[in-house]
Amino acid sequence: MKGQSRSCPICKRPVPEGEGAKRHHPFCSKRCADIDLSRWLAGVYAIPATASEDATQNGVPDGEPEGDIESEPKVRH
């Protein structure tokens, strides 16, 4: 990719070339790298989830535990 200018995924400015630029790769600066990290930690980047095929085939709705394990013990009075 010699000769081609890359842009920072956060601010879209050109990423500087050279040894110093490798420190924050693929971002242009520590500031943009920190913004990206903050977004990851806050859950901004997420993959949309759908009901898994296994859960629907087994008749267990997504999010409910499978098997004989009860989430709360039943108390008889």
Image (cartoon, rainbow, N blue to C red):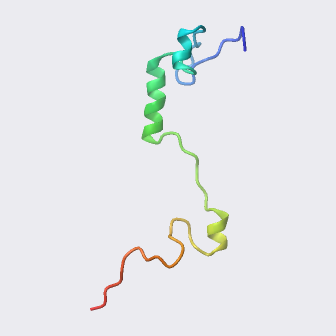
| Rendered location of residue 11, percent (x, y) | 52, 20
Q: Which of 53/18 is in front?
A: 18
Kindly give the residue lying farthest to the bottom in the view shown: 77
Kindly give the residue lying farthest to the front in the view shown: 19
Q: Indicate whether 36 appears above or below 41.
A: above
Q: Residue at x 50, y 79 (%)?
A: 68
Q: Which of 27/7 is in front?
A: 27
Q: Quadrant of residue 8?
A: top right
Q: Residue at x 56, y 15 (%)?
A: 22
Q: Residue at x 46, y 76 (%)?
A: 69
Q: Indicate whether 20 appears above or below 10.
A: above
Work out which quarter of the rendered image holds the N terminus and state it: top right
Q: How many marks?
A: 0
| Rendered location of residue 7, percent (x, y) | 61, 17
| Rendered location of residue 50, percent (x, y) | 61, 57
| Rendered location of residue 39, percent (x, y) | 46, 34
Work out which quarter of the rendered image holds the C terminus and state it: bottom left
Q: Which of 51/1 is in front?
A: 1
